[in-house]
Amino acid sequence: MTQRKSFGSDNQAGAHGAVLSALARANLGDAVGYGDDPWTQRAAAALCTAFGARGGAFFVFTGTAANVLGLSLLLRPYEGVICADSAHVNVDECGAPERILGSKLLTVPAPDGKLTPGLISAQLADRGDEHRVQARVVTISQVTELGTCYTLAELKSLGEFCRAEKLRLYIDGARLANAAAHLGCSLADLAAQADVLSFGGTKNGAVGAEAVVVMAEELIAHVPFLRKQQGQLASKMRYLAVQFQALLDADLWLRNAAHANAMARRLADGIRGAPGVGLWQPVESNAVFASLDPAHIARLQQDWQFYVWDTTAQVVRWMTAYDTTEADVDTFVADVWRTAQA
Amino acid sequence: MTQRKSFGSDNQAGAHGAVLSALARANLGDAVGYGDDPWTQRAAAALCTAFGARGGAFFVFTGTAANVLGLSLLLRPYEGVICADSAHVNVDECGAPERILGSKLLTVPAPDGKLTPGLISAQLADRGDEHRVQARVVTISQVTELGTCYTLAELKSLGEFCRAEKLRLYIDGARLANAAAHLGCSLADLAAQADVLSFGGTKNGAVGAEAVVVMAEELIAHVPFLRKQQGQLASKMRYLAVQFQALLDADLWLRNAAHANAMARRLADGIRGAPGVGLWQPVESNAVFASLDPAHIARLQQDWQFYVWDTTAQVVRWMTAYDTTEADVDTFVADVWRTAQA
Amino acid sequence: MTQRKSFGSDNQAGAHGAVLSALARANLGDAVGYGDDPWTQRAAAALCTAFGARGGAFFVFTGTAANVLGLSLLLRPYEGVICADSAHVNVDECGAPERILGSKLLTVPAPDGKLTPGLISAQLADRGDEHRVQARVVTISQVTELGTCYTLAELKSLGEFCRAEKLRLYIDGARLANAAAHLGCSLADLAAQADVLSFGGTKNGAVGAEAVVVMAEELIAHVPFLRKQQGQLASKMRYLAVQFQALLDADLWLRNAAHANAMARRLADGIRGAPGVGLWQPVESNAVFASLDPAHIARLQQDWQFYVWDTTAQVVRWMTAYDTTEADVDTFVADVWRTAQA
Amino acid sequence: MTQRKSFGSDNQAGAHGAVLSALARANLGDAVGYGDDPWTQRAAAALCTAFGARGGAFFVFTGTAANVLGLSLLLRPYEGVICADSAHVNVDECGAPERILGSKLLTVPAPDGKLTPGLISAQLADRGDEHRVQARVVTISQVTELGTCYTLAELKSLGEFCRAEKLRLYIDGARLANAAAHLGCSLADLAAQADVLSFGGTKNGAVGAEAVVVMAEELIAHVPFLRKQQGQLASKMRYLAVQFQALLDADLWLRNAAHANAMARRLADGIRGAPGVGLWQPVESNAVFASLDPAHIARLQQDWQFYVWDTTAQVVRWMTAYDTTEADVDTFVADVWRTAQA
């Protein structure tokens, strides 16, 4: 437990009160296990409506699990996944895709974390060559690991490219809510080009819940078996489902994300002009990537929890959460200024 | 949501109030993610103490995940797992061990769900033959899938046999609490022979939490990586940990299990003598396996939720839970009698 | 090198002279690697014609590899393979199917090594249950591991059952030639019900070569990639292909198999009436399974190479090969009589 | 079959006469299968002596299979393999390492195909972080895919670095013979720093045979099982073993490699000064990487078989083999000049 508000990660925040209340409300009597209960059916239906999904929505426990399950719907054993080299599936999942799917990741350097048709094209030269893994899925993160967002136009262009090239599109949506808030669009707008995507609850105020949203009906028959095999079938499913219901009710998910984004904006605005402090990426979500002097980083970390993103580039990542207050930001900004001017 | 108390499974019960309260208490401020928080450290330490484990205790989300993680600590790719043919890992995990571990299960018919040194021996003939999977781990369930318990003497004999044969012993403890309550022994007594075991929280009143307890220190270095790779690393780990803390406090786990066992005992006693109703297995936990006429099964299922275990043998499984009341049991027993005498 | 003819296995025989000659003939100048050469194309086409395959024929190095490649064409990760408990894939491949495919084998006790629609049916109860591996492929061995053959009527009945139940049929044909010789039918007759099958060259006089024959066109697109990924793509493919060409030319494969079968028949006839010697299985190929006194087994093994199949049942396996002579058999038979009467 | 000598790959050459003769000599009578025969034991012992290996030598069929088997001895599931981005395991094995081992490759851009301690260091930052694959094995190719060789001093420096960092060193030696010939050193010199390495026979005049040489005794217990599970256990092993025996006898392997290298040297010398033709990499084995005008590439390919290595850089690869003659080279060189001057 940190005394001051953490800027380390949005998953260091606790759960929103509405989520805990929903758990308590669901705790009445028995429910058939494994999702055959009214809470799960209602929440899944609500997600399908929100995403415009003809397939279905399925709850799992972690972001890594959501990505592995989602990708496992789309791949044969010899097929590969094109992703940015900074992608969570490539960097932060301890090799789960390779180990659980057996698939190779075909990584592309992407300075702003975003793939483009041009970057993807370069990975398609070897199609048909039996010595080479066959590219089959493109996966993007929305919000990216660098805090940037694909615009709707960029998504459309990627979707069209993928369909033309017979590639499937998977979206890692651990922070999809923040993208919707930033772009001012609906979840359905974000999902329109995707075959499968994840929708993160944990970083948006849940205790711990992620959803895999399957857009096309023909893919869903496999999900129950793959989810079970991958250790992600909750027996008391209602407690996952109601977390999402709480976030969906009255668009709490959007309010949480919009607030977190606004706090990142406030932070970025606050440090503008501080000597030696620069923004490394545009602020398009609840992350601020800033470069500053290593000595200043060290001094700030004495009092504040945040991560150094890149030691050689001297870049830090400051994350805000749904429960970060204006006062939290202002105190932190003042400390950044004090440090920078020392 | 079933109106009458379900006898379908102990995972159809809700969560114990103390578990929900613990979630609320943990929901204060920020915590570093992935288990580097005081709640997780306290609960893990408490589990190690209770089990006499020099290694560590690690939280995961489901029983299948606990089994896969536990077994993955003990196996090389060409090594196999000896288990009863009725074992959960063999029957009820959609092939997760084969798929995630790549390991073959070497199954042994065991009429009461229990392995013996003699039954295991028969699987050891091919050691050293490169054409054959090499037996390396023995896995038992305590309570077994048939509701029976290994006595401490049986466990000791299995442990000695395994050590003599250089086999590792894994215990699937999804209902370990019920075994401790039945045998009147400690968790450390149950764990004494094992290399790794799971300890189920979900069926004991948790929202959803299982622990993997690693007895020996030399095995734990691998756990964090394997848990992450298998999609089981909770970012907001505190909410898993405090569920176990709530169950450990004042031995709630034991009281829950003892109560569920007593209700099964009451049920079994209640139906004794009902025409055409027989016990298929001794009642040594919170499960009653009974054989009865298919027509009577169908009639009872109109009003009550429970599963037919074996259609050809006409065996049903009635599970009790920590929150099954004497009145629940008595109403059900009366219905069994009414049906049996119809 | 054994002095006397081995009855241990048909893979202990050397290569047929025609196969070695074919290797020498193919050793002229360069050839494009990986199968894009005239020898490979001719041999693959000849196999397709012989089997009536619209798909294709693909060469690999070992029987285990052929089975794994063949099955990998037919399975999704959560789907299982129904097989006899004595099947080579279950017993003799060191867990390759579980490890490489990730699939569970659903084994059926089959006293004569042969599956029937009835035996298969018992494995289909759990279809649709997400906790259970979903049966998708039936694999049979023709000749079986117990030396028995499915009749064409039995094959037809299995094929019809599989199609009705939406199950795929894979045939492990490591000794398919011996089955054709025994049944007096064509390879196409044997393949008619199968989706994919293997055709063994190694036990039929090759240096080392197996073929995977894919009956249906829609499956072949995946083969090149899966074969490469599984380490079975020969760079100098012509040397695999010409082995099969040599066996196909003038039906050498059939003559080799018919001769081996005749030698087994001669052996079985020869020992008829020897005291304490019984046939354990009907002789329908080049294997004789006999039961005899353990002391007699030990005495015979001092002079002859063969394997004890089942120590508790005191059953031995005597295999003949394409190059076993009548004199070899007669000398051995005389020794069996001498031992039995001692 | 190409009319003119192919410069496409050393695996397009046929087998050396001595190898075919050895096959014929081994084709006498029966031999116990799976390697328990005198030919296999002799050849394995000869390889161990040549490499100074205390462990053992094991025969497999393909280079991909050798790499997968070798790496599988050295890795736990969550451990990764550091390799050059141009490595065969990364580019040319259709994802076999990811699929069969489940391991992630941690690739490093290496302009000349060679890793250095400095390049490897950059991959070690995340050791101990459970979110990241843990680097455990360094794999290098000797000769590299770009035709370059590590010097003995470079190997020593890599070996010392790996031991200091507790990393294992695997050498992909598909063209190890060419490296020995180029460096004028023994196989033992090349193997001295490695834990496991492969030794290619196929590109050196074999019909098709590769060896996995295990330097340390403590690793070999696992090999037989892993080889079988990976589909690489030859039943008629003698025919793999004698190919290596033929190459080892009177250092045929070295004479073959030295000749191929000399032909590459002759080719490189011959084209020196041809207009618009440049060497892209130093010639340190049997490969010549040259850059030339795309129109000239196309014209040459009308008459000659070779591969374009890099379309954007306009680089071609010309490989020589053990049976490439001086006349073959001179004719080709003349054509290059003619084309370049056209």
Image (cartoon, coloured by chain):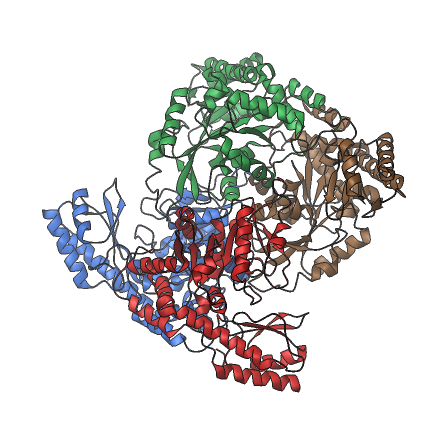
Chain colours: A blue, B red, C brown, D green
Q: Quadrant of residue C92?
A: top right
Q: Quadrant of residue A29?
A: bottom left
Residue D317, image x, y percentages: 49, 25
Report the number of numbered marks: 0
* Closer to the camera in the image, A175 or C133: C133
Q: Residue furthest right?
A: C273
D184 above or below C59?
above
- Which residue is found at the position 56% from the left and 12% from the top? D326
- Which residue is found at the position 32% from the left and 54% from the top? A149
Q: Residue furthest left?
A: A342
Q: Is residue C305 left or right of residue B70?
A: right
Residue D125, image x, y percentages: 32, 40
- Which residue is found at the position 81% from the left and 48% from the top? C281
Q: Quadrant of residue C23?
A: top right
* Closer to the camera in the image, D283 or A66: A66
Q: Would residue C323 be visible to someone looking at this image? A: yes
A165 above or below B173?
above
Residue C78, image x, y percentages: 57, 56
Residue C238, image x, y percentages: 66, 30
The quadrant in which the N terminus of chain D is found is top right
